[in-house]
Image (spheres, grey):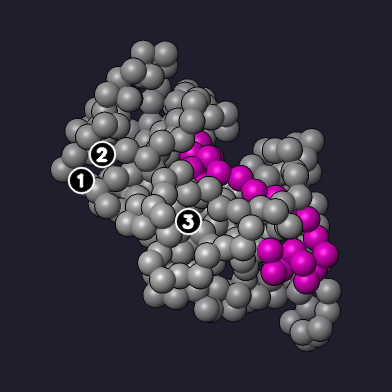
Amino acid sequence: MRVLGLDTATATAGIAIVDGEPRDPADARVLGETRHDTSGRGADLLVAIDELCRATGVLDPHDAASRLSIDAIAIGAGPGSFTGLRIGMATAKGIAFAAARPLWAVSSLAALADDAQHELASEGRTAEAGGMICAVLDARRGEVFAGWFRRGIALGAERVLAPAELAPWTAELAAASTHVCFAGDAIDAYPGVLGALAAGHRWCAARTPSGGAVARLALAGARVDITVGGAPVYIRPSEAEIMYPDGVPGALRRRT
């Protein structure tokens, strides 16, 4: 199966075309992969996806009207940037509808942990790759999004918390494993607070989720089509919901 993997939870979108089978997703091959800066706007995200599809041969470069030869689309559903997640979900749904292909969703934090696991395995650190990995993304507002995983399995619910709260959470869970690693761009946003964790544990080079990891996890997952009812996973309320819990003043009320 060929899967288009996409993640826009951060300012750096991950896009990939992966060829693999649900029965053995670990052997999936990345046919092509790229990163795309979405910090300004996501208007040219489709251009980056189109270029990758043409470069990998899943879209004929000489026939723009040809059918996209992929079997499914996989999207990182969050948590992450509210605007980025909405852009990614809308883009993925548009491609799924147009290509008449299913859309599968996975956790963006789980995808980041998968990237870290592959990074460790490629370096021959098999014990660490099989240990606990904490994926930590900058959530802005003085907070981080974090989730603990072992071999793709979530070790509890993902959280949004202050960077200083990550250390006690780590101490609580680290007793169950001799190998604990971290990954994510939160270390760059909060080097002072998270630097102590980086000193005591390995912080992988993986900073943002890749499209390849999203596709691999989707192949290994339940593969439920969310094209119609799927929505991003925000974890925390938006700023508008916090400021206007009873609705924006003067806005039209939703019909019941």
Is disc 1 surrounded by few (<14), some (14 to 19) or many (20+) residues within 10 Å?
some
Check disc 2 and report the residue beneath it.
Answer: 163
What residue is shown at x 66% (from left), y 53% (from top)? 230
Residue stretch in magenta: 93-120
Q: Residue furthest top?
A: 175
Report the amino acid beneath label 1: Pro
Q: CA distance from mark 1 to mark 2?
A: 10 Å
Question: Dominant secondary structure of the magenta stretch?
Answer: helix
Whether residues under marks 1 and 3 lie with C-beta atoms below 8 angstroms apart, the answer is no
In primary-sequence order, the first of circles 1 and 3 is 3
Q: CA distance from mark 2 to mark 3?
A: 19 Å
Vertical comparison of 59 with 112: above or below: below
Q: Position of residue 44 (x, y in %)?
A: 53, 79
Check disc 3 and report the residue beneath it.
Answer: 9
Relative placement, left or right, of 71 versus 18 is right
In primary-sequence order, the first of circles 2 and 3 is 3
What residue is shown at x 53% (from left), y 40% (from top)? 110
Report the amino acid beneath label 2: Pro
Assign a secondary structure to mark 2.
Answer: helix
Q: Position of residue 113 (x, y in %)?
A: 49, 39
Please tell me which residue lies in front, 10 or 119.
10
User: What is the count of numbered marks?
Assistant: 3
What residue is shown at x 34% (from left), y 18% (from top)? 172
What residue is shown at x 32% (from left), y 38% (from top)? 161
Q: Is residue 103 magenta?
A: yes
Is disc 2 surrounded by few (<14), some (14 to 19) or many (20+) residues within 10 Å?
many
- Which label is found at residue 191? 1
- Which label is found at residue 219? none
Q: Position of residue 198 (x, y in %)?
A: 26, 35
Please tell me which residue lies in front, 7 or 114.
7
